[in-house]
Amino acid sequence: MDLKLKDKVVLITASSKGIGRATAELFIKEGARVAISSSNESNLKSAVDEIKRSFNYEPFWNICDLNNSKEIQNTYNLVKDHLGDVDILVNNCGGPAPGLFEDLTDNKWEHGYEQVLMSAVRFSRLVLPSMKSRRWGRIINITSLSVKQPVLNLMLSNSFRSALTAFAKTLSQQVGEYNVTVNNVAPGFTLTGRLYELAVERAKTSGSSHEHILAEMANEVPLKRLGKPDEVGAMIVYLASEQANYITGQTIAVDGGVIKSTY
């Protein structure tokens, strides 16, 4: 199937590893022109080197702290200067910090707000004018199963990823007439560094090993395994394609069936 993504300009945030990086690699396979970013320069350079060796393609890259509005603006400007107007924006971020309500200070709430919600708002604000003028665009947010089924110790993620979901739904109503779609992909238990870190944190208080906790997570999934980053990336790439022209305002779970609700 030709997804008609050749030469499309794709910007993926927080994409030096995990789901973001897997998504970047899938877009590269489709012939898109890809820009990746991360706040960690070492991880970013390593990702670029590995992608170049694997795909004979060097993505444009820039260091970007998603909590810093100036760095967001700078990243957008550089991508536009080097690759052109952004056709497809994939808003991704790490974290925010785990914790129960009593564990979370105002600073952690503010950090989560900037990292999860406002980074997506700011990047969306930057890419939308050109998308609207060209009457084509895709904004895809990577959220979490927690927007449909809250996770006990992820108060910040539950709160701000749900806010991002509501933002995306509302925005989709306002930009649809310009042939710009806005969707969310909600991963379940996907084997990334983030999931590993959460398992390690849980192990500290549970008396179990992180390996046992990861095995328990896998057992909660009807498919009886953890997801792979490229399985989430495949849905993102599909939503960016011409074949997904009539899908907007949706939150699509890629979770192996772990979410128990019927909608």
Image (cartoon, grey):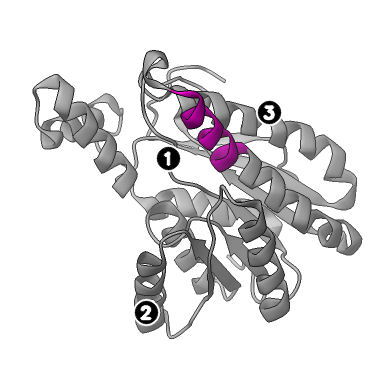
Looking at the rendered structure, the number of numbered marks drawn on it comes to 3
Mark 2: which amino acid? Asp
Of the 4 image quadrants, the one containing the C terminus is top right
| Front residue of 173 and 17 | 17
Of the 4 image quadrants, the one containing the N terminus is bottom right
**Does residue 3 show up?**
no
| Front residue of 17 and 218 | 17
Mark 1: which amino acid? Gly
Mark earlier in primary sequence (2, 3): 2
The residue range painted magenta reads 105-117
What separation in Å lies between label 1 and label 3 (alpha carbons)? Answer: 19 Å
- Which numbered mark, 2 or 1, is in the foreground of this view? 1
**Which percent across, then down, holds residue 116?**
56, 39
- Which numbered mark, 1 or 3, is in the foreground of this view? 1
Residue of label 1: 95
Residue at (46%, 20%) from the top-left corner?
A: 149
